[in-house]
Image: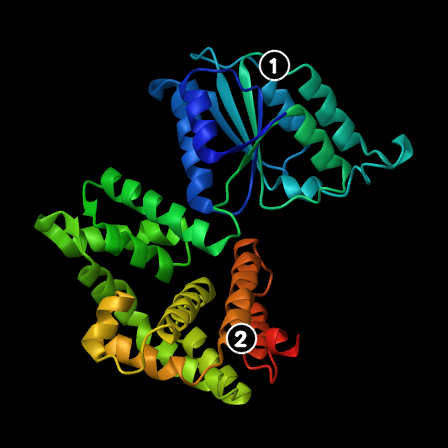
Amino acid sequence: MPTLAVEKFIERITKGKPVPGVLLLGSDAYLRDLCRTRLVEACVPADARDWGVSRFSAASDSLDRILARAQTLPMLTPRQVVFVEDVDAWQGRGGKADQGDSNEDSTVKELAAYLDDPAPFTVLVLEAGTLDKRLRLFKTLSEKVLVVLVELGENPEERISLATALAQEIAGEMGVKLLGDAAEELSECSNGDLARIRTEISKLATYAAERRSITLADVEALVISARKYSVWQLADLLATRERSRALEFLDSLLREGEQPAGLVGALAWMYRKLLEAQDLSPHLSGWQAARALSMRADTAELALRQSRKIPRAQLLDGLAALYEADSRLKSGAANPRAVMEFLVARLTCTQSASAAG
């Protein structure tokens, strides 16, 4: 079966094309919720959703129970949608894809048997953050269901570009206009995390009130300023590779309630701005730098000063480390604090990988 991006999947179901089985693969909460909502809207009338929409977890519900529901004719609606979260809990039960039937678990066999002859009145939606492509579960699902990638992708520029466009759509759904430069800044400082972007837009919409228009100044005042000074303080420690003090500062931020994903997003935004600042003339005034960097003058001056302290190779390696940490956190890392401490250790390493190469 094909692998689709979210927009292609929504286009397909909007046209009424039948989809007996779907795998939502990826960790972006907003995109996953968007797919769920559009699928339910396309398949089940609003007044029948109490009967026509079911939710299960592969981690706590048996496959027998899930498939029994999928094979039961729904009440008051011609079609039903059955959601199954945590499908990665089944991972490993089917053995490697290139191994023989002796390693094939009954869970994967039973699931494959259903997908070979699915109930015509059911859309079975399986959800997983990640699946190992070497294992039989992924091979079975990729052959028998429609795979939808609920991720913006790994390329930073493409990720921010897509998040910017989606941020403006989200704002429109809330009845406000998010101006282009504001959308881009919000996407950058949120590191393309659509769930966080949606939360911030909700706050910004209230902040903008009767204006019904969110500007760059609004984003800087409400989203960035609340975090920027702590982030720049941490940047000072990272620039001088003061690991012990950086870890102490991180500990204080986490104790004060800062969320690891939010800190990673803010740091990634800062690293991108530092790279941009390195390309500017050192003779620019604060307001000239502010215009070039799309930042407030005081923040732009901080960026110019910091950009002269940190070698470009260190910034590039740091940005790569931040994207890796972001991916681990979004994949449901068991110990987010450990992810952050390892990140600080990498960012304060005495020699960057680029420099070493």
The local secondary structure at tag 2 comes to helix
- In which quadrant of the rendered image does the C terminus lie? bottom right
Question: x and y percent of residue 348 in the render?
Answer: 55, 82
Residue at 77% x, 36% y is 136
In this view, the residue in front, 65 or 341, is: 341
Residue at 61% x, 82% y is 351
Mark 2–mark 1 Cα distance, whole angstroms, equals: 55 Å
Question: x and y percent of residue 269 in the render?
Answer: 39, 66
Would residue 94 appear left or right of 167 to someone viewing this image?
right
Residue corresponding to mark 1: 119
Q: Amino acid at mark 2?
A: Ala
Question: x and y percent of residue 219 in the render?
Answer: 24, 60
Q: Is residue 50 visible?
A: no
Question: x and y percent of residue 282 in the render?
Answer: 31, 82
Give the label, 2 or 1, closer to the camera: 2
Residue corresponding to mark 2: 313
Q: Residues within 10 Å of mark 1 (few under 14, many from 20)?
A: some
- In which quadrant of the rendered image does the N terminus lie? top right
Q: Which picture quadrant has residue 262?
A: bottom left
Would residue 64 appear left or right of 19 to someone viewing this image?
right
**Residue closest to the far left:** 210
Would residue 159 appear left or right of 99 to someone viewing this image?
left
